[in-house]
Image (cartoon, helix red, strand yellow):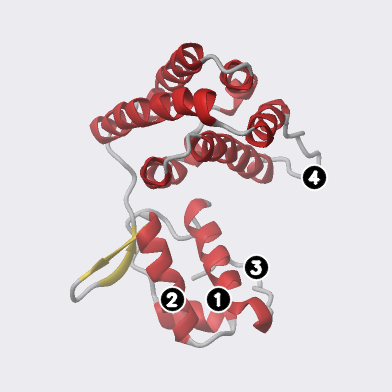
Amino acid sequence: MVNQQPVRPLRRSTLGEDVYETLKVLVLEHTLTPGDRINIDALARDLAVSPTPIREALARLEADGLVRKRPLVGYTVSPLLTRAEFTHMFEMRSLLEAAAARYAAERASDTLRAAISAEAATTVDTDDGDPEGWHWHAAFTTLDARFHELVATAAGNPLLADGIARLHAHLHLHRRYFPYAETGTTGAEHQRIADAIRVGAPAAAEAAMRDHLDRARDRHLPAFE
């Protein structure tokens, strides 16, 4: 169920969080593939835990939008979005995240402005021991998500930040199809957003975020072909 490699038993002191993070990785890396029915007992055996922390982790993943619970079926991994749904998701991201960038430029503390700038400047090196690039890809998408989360946090509106986080769950399911050759372009776009936030330029931050999301959507769309 959980790939061919043996699974290391989890530490009891942080069991609930470890199970949640482990299942999240399995979903995002498509070891548990979109649409799959999740076998709780099999996961419990593979992870050497009782079914209880598995169920608790699945409830959290359901709140994240990464799994769904259906009557008489149980939990399944959320399916990938269709092209139309993907476009709709980016339309919502543009509305919410462009506003978040504007608010961040107006409201962010000096500490958050510095953190956003530092995150935009961070890069992920390729790993010679990772020939297929999966660990590098995961690190890059984590970095990308962290940048957007920081901007949302800096906006100073928890409801706005929560809405953005929920939309990102759908995007994370598609991360294996991200055009990783464009990581440099993504980094440059993040830098423009960060620069506008750092100097307190709301209109420029909003425009830079909207431009970034329009370009990001266009970079993803060929995967649907």
The secondary structure type at the circle numbered 3 is loop
Which residue: 58% across, 16% down? 196
Circles 1 and 3 in contact, beta carbons < 8 Å: no
Q: Amino acid at mark 2?
A: Glu
Q: Earlier in the sequence, mark 3 or mark 4?
A: 3
Mark whose residue sits in front, 1 or 3: 1
Q: Are marks 2 and 1 in contact (CB under 8 Å)?
A: yes
- 32 relative to 189 in the view: left or right: left
What's the CA distance linking mark 3 and mark 2?
24 Å
Q: Could you tell me how far apart the alpha carbons at marks 2 and 1 are, in whole angstroms?
A: 8 Å
Q: Residue at x 51, y 65 (%)?
A: 23
| x and y percentages locating residue 166 in the rendered image | 38, 47
Circle 3 sits on which residue? 5
In the current view of this chain or complex, which residue is farthest to the bottom?
Answer: 50
Estimate how packed mark 4 is, as few (under 14), some (14 to 19) or many (20 or more) residues with alpha carbons within 10 Å: few
Q: Is residue 207 visible?
A: yes
Horizontally, is 129 left or right of 83 in the view?
A: right
Residue at the extreme left of the image, as rendered:
71
Q: Look at mark 2 in the image and give the residue it sits on.
A: 56
Question: Which callout, 2 or 1, points at the residue further toward the start of the chain?
Answer: 1
Viewer-proximal residue, 117 or 109?
A: 109
Disc 3, disc 2: CB below 8 Å? Answer: no
Per the rendering, the mark at residue 16 is 1
| Residue density around tag 3, few if under 14, some if 14–19, many if 20 or more, within 10 Å | few
In the image, residue 8 lies at what x, y percent? 69, 75
Q: What residue is disc 4 on?
A: 129
Q: Nearer the viewer, residue 106 or 197?
A: 106
Q: Give how far apart the Cα atoms at labels 1 and 4 are.
A: 31 Å
| Image height of 154 relative to 74, above or below | above
Q: Position of residue 150 (x, y in %)?
A: 57, 38
